[in-house]
Image: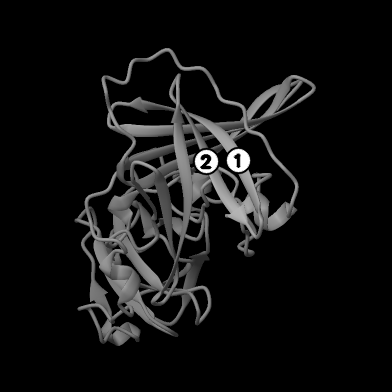
Amino acid sequence: MKTKFNLLLIPLLIMGAFFLTFTACEDDEEDDGQSIAGKWYVYNDVDINIDDQGEEAYDDYYYKEYDYDFYAADIYDISESAVTIYENESGTEYSSQEMDYEMLDGNKIVASITDGTQTYYDTADYHFDGDMLVIVTSQSEGGEEYYRNEMYLKPYNGDLPPASWTTEIQADNYESDDAYTEATEIEVGGEPQQHSTTSADDDWFHFDAEAGETYVLKVSGYMDNYLELYSTDGTTQIDSDDDSSPELDGTTYWGNPYLVWTCQASGTYYFNVKGWSDNSLGYYYMEVDLDDGTAKKSTDDKEKKKPENHSFFFSK
């Protein structure tokens, strides 16, 4: 999940000297003395567009159970007076940015950042939802709110930056599996297998299927993958998928395949998982399950689809 701290960082880059003021949402919950100081990762970043028809929300979840050592996480390190935002880029490159802040009454904070000789200020509301820190910003025009962002952060206890950000991605323990003759066995209904994809890497798998049964082949992770299913000869392609997972499963990254297939003849079948391009690197989990009656087949045209940028402030 690619996101930036919404308290003015990206508006400065995009809009130069244009001054933005964010109004805070009221919150009546008591925080029992909880402090915002600490290390946090962004669990959900919600953009909410508001018009005469109501509110339309766009959730951007980060599920650490589908990632390796927070490889794709955005992490905030909050002290008593400053916020440092860490974001992984690619390979061993990552970025960090810092802004100062002050606490106000009523669970509000004012963040400040200096651009040259000009200092900009923004306000935000915060509260706690269990162990989550929630930061809320909004924009209004003519007294009417038209945009709101709600960022949910969970505690992070690891290193800064995580080791996965500073270590080149290594081939996984299933190599060499670059051809169907070297395919890794994956058990139907078994635990998801963790794999990594390096440049121009094909990971091959095989599983036993029974005629009449419907199977779900699911990739989970924070990289852009492509999946191809082959018949028992390992060379005849049956089907393929690119990035249907958010549409059909709703729990993983937009670049993940999700394939539903009904077996016509019992046997051992093959499939491979690879990056969408040679630059698609990262970690993923692979699992094959029997359809429990809830799986939905994709209706897309298999073309590359990237999510629209619904945020006025930043690109994801």
Asked if residue 37 lies left or right of residue 310, the reply is: left
> What x and y, as percent, mark residue 177?
29, 83
Q: Are marks 1 and 2 in contact (CB under 8 Å)?
A: yes
Residue 231 against residue 80 in the figure, above or below: below
Percent x, y of residue 204? 33, 77
Name the mark on residue 144: none
Residue displayed at 46% across by 17% down? 27
Secondary structure beneath label 2: strand
- Give above or below for 74 relative to 292: below
In front: 308, or 186?
Answer: 308
- How many residues crowd around disc 1 within 10 Å: few (fewer than 14), some, or many (20 or more)? some
Please state if 56 lies on the left or on the right of 86 as rendered: right
Residue 263 in view here? no
Residue 98 relative to residue 69: left or right: right
Q: Amino acid at mark 2?
A: Ala
- Mark found first going from the N terminus, 1 or 2: 2
Q: Is residue 256 above or below residue 23?
A: below
Mark 1, residue position: 121
Disc 2 residue crowd, few under 14, some 14–19, many 20+, Cα 10 Å: many
